[in-house]
Amino acid sequence: MTEKFAVVIAKPRQEEKAACNFELQGIEYFLPRLKRRKEIIPLFPRYLFASIDQGFNKLSSTRGVQGLVTFGQYPAVVCSKVIAMVKAVCDEKGIYKVDTRKFRQGQKVKTKEGLFSGQLGTVARLSDSGRIEVLMNILGRSTRVVMDEDDIIAA
């Protein structure tokens, strides 16, 4: 592993393009990403890390790259230990693997708005799409209601 990495600024929405071009040039890079709902997005939008072994000019002239983060006239450098720590919380594809769900199965919740505003319930099932199945007492019966996780709060 390279000793030092530069902090690269990608052009807007071109992090993947920059990463692909680094790979084609044989430059070691790291693009940490995050899975949000059904899409995978950069963990640090517009930023990725690339090895400085082949020089700063080669990095900044790569397609998809806008420039490098600098302190004055000197490029910002991150040591490999910091990169290794970030990689440690990512899977093999560089996707951040921490469970970011606000709720857990069996948790008591309260609806914020809508038809069931203020109604209490229990989380029955969670999905990867950001939807939650909640058990609510409606008309004296336990009924399953599917709603967006943004529409409920912890009770």
Image (cartoon, grey):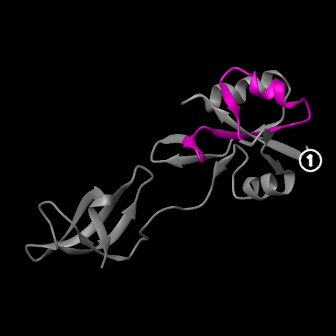
Q: How many marks?
A: 1
Q: Is 119 or 144 nearer to us in this picture?
A: 119
Q: Residue at x 79, y 56 (%)?
A: 82
Task: Examine the structure image and report whether residue 43 is included in the region drawn in magenta.
Answer: yes
Closest to the observer, 114 or 147: 114
Foreground pick, 8 / 138: 8
Q: Toward which corner of the image does residue 42 lie, by quadrant?
A: top right
Residue depicted at x 83% and y 24%: 58
Q: Compared to 85, does 58 lie above or below?
A: above
Q: Which residue is mark 1?
A: 3
Q: Identify whether 45 is placed above or below 122.
A: above
Is-magenta flag for residue 115? no
User: Which amino acid is tagged 1?
Assistant: Glu
Q: Which residues are magenta?
A: 41-69
Q: Position of residue 99 (x, y in %)?
A: 55, 62
Q: Quadrant of residue 98?
A: bottom right
Q: In the orientation shown, which residue stands out farthest toward the left?
A: 139
Residue placed furthest toward the front: 72
Q: Please state, as top left, top right, bottom left or bottom right, where the C terminus lies in the image.
A: bottom left
Q: Nearer the viewer, residue 78 or 13?
A: 78
Instruction: Tell me residue 37's x, y (percent).
Output: 45, 47
Identified at 34% across, 70% down, the residue is: 123
How many C-alpha atoms fall within 10 Å of the one at disc 1: few (<14), some, or many (≥20)?
few
Q: Quadrant of the N terminus?
A: top right
Q: Quadrant of residue 88?
A: bottom right
Identify whether 89 is placed above or below 27.
below
Residue 108 picture location, percent across and down: 32, 78
Q: Position of residue 116 (x, y in %)?
A: 14, 66
Q: Secondary structure at mark 1?
A: loop
| Left or right position of 40 against 86 | left
